[in-house]
Image (cartoon, rainbow, N blue to C red):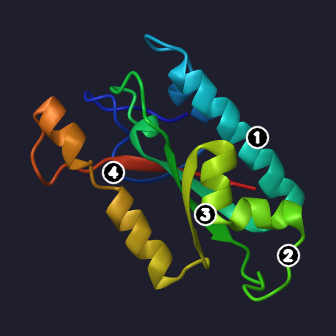
């Protein structure tokens, strides 16, 4: 089970979890139904990703994985595509809809980037998303070098 620190954040690093664990920590009602609505969209996206058989993992971030934020704006994702994913293939619509940044934002209200497993790009995004956004640092009075954990759900 994932544990939060005294700031209601995951400790720095990438933490493996199931969708059920994500729901228990971050997808429940807090002051409004914003978290539950976002979690429903996340579950819809996961269902479609499994159908498309395109990802080996999805890393979840943003204010959604900050339990100290009652009403997160959205969910940020790093979608780690399968090692044999053909970036130049003609995609079926159900595949395109889960690997197009624009379509994912429109349909699911999720901000996603797509990376190859183990790539420099994946490592850079993990490092970047592990930093606490300046908006939240200012709101909570945290130092500029504040870090937080993010969650990896494997498919």
Q: Would residue 143 be visible to someone looking at this image?
A: yes
Q: Estimate the x, y position of residue 43 in percent, counting from the top left.
A: 72, 38
Mark 1–mark 3 Cα distance, whole angstroms, equals: 16 Å
Mark 2–mark 1 Cα distance, whole angstroms, equals: 20 Å
Answer with the quarter of the image where residue 136 lies: top left
Front position in the image: 22 or 53: 53
Residue name at image x 74 percent, y 48 percent: 46
Mark 2 or mark 1: whose residue is earlier in sequence: 1
- The residue that disc 2 covers is 91
* Image marks 1 and 3: residues in contact by CB distance under 8 Å: no
Which of discs 1 and 3 lies nearer the camera? The answer is 3
Q: Estimate the x, y position of residue 117 in percent, counting from the top left.
A: 61, 77
- The residue that disc 1 covers is 44
When the figure is inspected, residue 119 is found, relative to residue 34, above or below; the finding is below
Q: Estimate the x, y position of residue 91 in percent, counting from the top left.
A: 85, 75
Would you call the spot at circle 2 few (<14 residues within 10 Å), some (14-19), or many (20 or more)?
A: few
Front position in the image: 103 or 48: 103
Would you call the spot at circle 1 few (<14 residues within 10 Å), some (14-19), or many (20 or more)?
A: few
The number of callouts visible is 4
- The residue that disc 4 covers is 12
């Amino acid at each position: 089970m994932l544990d939060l620190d005294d700031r209601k954040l995951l400790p720095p690093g990438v933490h493996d979890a199931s969708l059920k664990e994500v729901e228990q920590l971050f997808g429940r009602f807090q002051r409004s139904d914003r978290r539950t609505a976002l979690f429903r969209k996340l579950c819809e996206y996961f269902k479609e990703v499994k159908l498309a058989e395109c990802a080996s993992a999805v890393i979840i971030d943003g204010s959604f994985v900050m339990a100290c934020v009652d009403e997160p704006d959205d969910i940020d994702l790093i979608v780690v595509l399968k090692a044999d994913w053909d970036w130049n293939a003609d995609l079926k619509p159900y595949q395109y809809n889960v690997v197009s940044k624009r379509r994912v934002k429109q349909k699911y209200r999720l901000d996603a980037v797509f990376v190859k497993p183990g790539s420099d790009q994946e490592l850079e995004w993990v490092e970047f998303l592990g930093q606490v956004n300046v908006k939240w640092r200012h709101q909570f009075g945290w130092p500029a070098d504040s870090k937080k954990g993010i969650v990896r759900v494997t498919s």
